[in-house]
Image: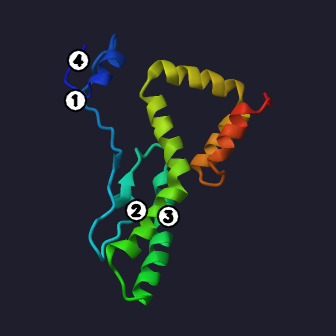
Amino acid sequence: MVHNADDGRVYGRLDGMKREGRLSAMGPLAYRVREPQVGGVMLVGDATGFYDPFTGEGIFTALRSAELLTETAHAALTRDDLSVGPLAVYGERRRAELAAKSRVTRGLQLLISRRRLSNLAVRLLARRPHLVHTLLGVFGDFVPPRELLRAAFSRRV
């Protein structure tokens, strides 16, 4: 077994494999960012935090956060008040609007990091294709995350 990957979680998954070249690993890439505590500063896109890019949801998040930022910035500029208070509305709205999707994404990241749990989830999804379609809709940002619960507890098979 080769032991030159930085992430210790990789080792067990490589048992019995033959190395064909230099082994390298990358990740996790996700990070969270606190809101700026100074006036005149607002963050948008990946500057507000970052999901591991396995579903592409960062594009929607960046675009939607830019829309919310412009609404808050316009109101603050109209009032000529770029202090922390008025600008904080943006962060509050962004977090509230994107919270459900963020929880789904973090849940999926947790699931992926645990092999047995991942295998169990794959078997469950294989028996419940409507749940797969709902999950893909959530990641495609055209199905609200709350629909996952409805799909998960529905009796459709």
- Which secondary structure lies at badge 2? helix
Q: Which of marks 4 and 3 is nearer the N terminus?
A: 4
The image quarter in which residue 74 lies = bottom left
Q: Which residue lies furthest to the front in this view?
A: 85
Q: Which residue is drawn at 57% across and 20% down?
A: 120
Dot 1 alpha-carbon crowd within 10 angstroms: few under 14, some 14 to 19, many 20 or more: few
Location of residue 122 by image quarter = top right
The residue type indicated by label 4 comes to Val
Inter-mark Cα distance, 3 to 1: 37 Å
Label 2 and label 4: CA atoms lie apart by 38 Å
Amino acid on which disc 1 is placed: Asp
Q: Which mark is first along the chain, 1 or 3?
A: 1
Secondary structure state at the residue bearing disc 4: loop
Disc 4, disc 3: CB below 8 Å? no
Q: Tell me the amino acid under the disc marked 2.
A: Gly
**Location of residue 87 in the rendering, given as x and y in whole percent from the top left corner:** 39, 73
Q: Residue 93 carries which label?
A: 3
The residue most toward the left is: 4
* Label 3 secondary element: helix
Q: Which residue is drawn at 46% across and 82% down?
A: 75
